[in-house]
Amino acid sequence: MSDFRLRVFATVARHLSFTKAGQELFVSQPAVTKHIRELEAQYGQRLLERRGNRVSLTEAGRLLHAHADAAAAAQQQLEDQLLALRDPEEAAGRLRLGASTTLAQYVLPGLLPAFQARYPQVQLSFLNANSERIADALLRGELDLGFVEGRTKSHDLHYEPLLPDELVAVRRVAPGSPLATPLSLAEALAHPLVLRERGSGTLEILEFALRAQHIKLSSLSVALYLDNTEAIKRYLEAAPAALGFVSRRALDRELAAGLLEIVPIKGLHLARQFEALWVQGQVLARPAQRFLSFVQGQFKGAK
């Protein structure tokens, strides 16, 4: 997008926030306001309405936002194609990845350095959000490739299984206590529970499993909903009576240090799949194709 003012406007329109736009673009809020006013003067129309801290698009603003998005996509496509001409077998250009929390924190970051070393011309960005937000971002054209866990599927997205995972119940290790003995489901659910937030694949898997046993989430004693696994683990370390549900892949350090322990629950098995996803019918650009193949190669045969 050659006109920086248009980029500023598109960023404000995406966040509906002058402050967040300034933070993303590394410019001051007064500078953001100046660029917007210049655009409004150029077009002779209000593009944004501000009421207190709330920002909304006018009809003219919605029209310009659609144009700005189309212009940015066209420019990026041109840049990617020009870069690809240098070496038809090489991957180059922008790659916007998104992953749900477990994948973003514990699975994918360790693979990124090797991918970058193999494909140095790929410009990576990485969004960490829950599964629902990753799917929405793909459908809005804000990501090229996503990675999630969960059971709900959108008919507008293609899902590709990658890696098996399991959710486990976990709690703080009491000093001098024996190894955790299996609990009945009723005993486990009698604990204060620490769970992931709505929209997360982790909570969705648990909710489906409980529903199969005719148990509603609303009937449980939930101490807290948290938006990431690290926060759940830290909470459990300080709350000896609480029980949480997290990915087994997120527990290596805590188990080795004797801080947390896995608690088997009779009759409750929370298996799931990590999956790659992209827009249905969309042909992945070469950087996304290369990254998907790279990740599939790393996960081949993994259990």
Image (tube, helix red, strand yellow):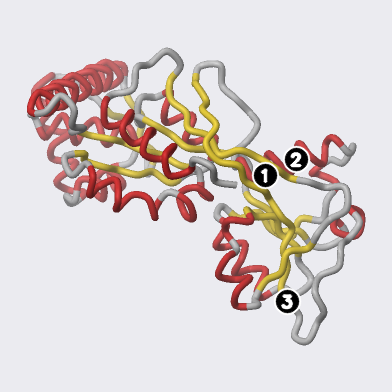
- Where residue 26 appears, as percent x and y from the top left, is 19, 51
Q: Distance from label 2 to label 1 (Cα)?
A: 6 Å
Secondary structure state at the residue bearing disc 2: helix
In terms of depth relative to the viewer, which is nearer, 220 or 107? 107
Q: Residues within 10 Å of mark 3 (few under 14, many from 20)?
A: many
Residues at badges 2 and 1 in contact (C-beta under 8 Å)?
Answer: yes
Question: Horizontally, is 191 left or right of 44 in the view?
Answer: right
Residue under numbered circle 3: 173
Q: Distance from label 3 to label 2 (Cα)?
A: 26 Å
Question: Horizontally, is 83 left or right of 171 in the view?
Answer: left
**Which one is earlier in the sequence, the residue at label 1 or at label 3?**
3
Q: Nearer the viewer, mark 1 or mark 3?
A: 3
- Where residue 162 appears, as percent x and y from the top left, is 52, 36
Residue 221 visible in the snapshot: yes
Residue farthest to the top, as pictured: 281
In terms of depth relative to the viewer, which is nearer, 301 or 256? 301
Question: Horizontally, is 126 left or right of 160 in the view?
Answer: left
Secondary structure state at the residue bearing disc 3: loop
The residue drawn where x is 70% and y is 55% is: 245
Residue under numbered circle 2: 207
Question: Mark 1: which amino acid?
Answer: Leu
Look at the picture and state if 89 lies above or below 64.
below
Residue under numbered circle 1: 203
The residue drawn where x is 20% and y is 45% is: 25
Residue farthest to the front, as pictured: 301
In terms of depth relative to the viewer, which is nearer, 24 or 169? 169
Question: Mark 3: which amino acid?
Answer: Val
The residue drawn where x is 49% and y is 30% is: 135
| Tag of residue 286 | none
Residue 16 visible in the snapshot: no
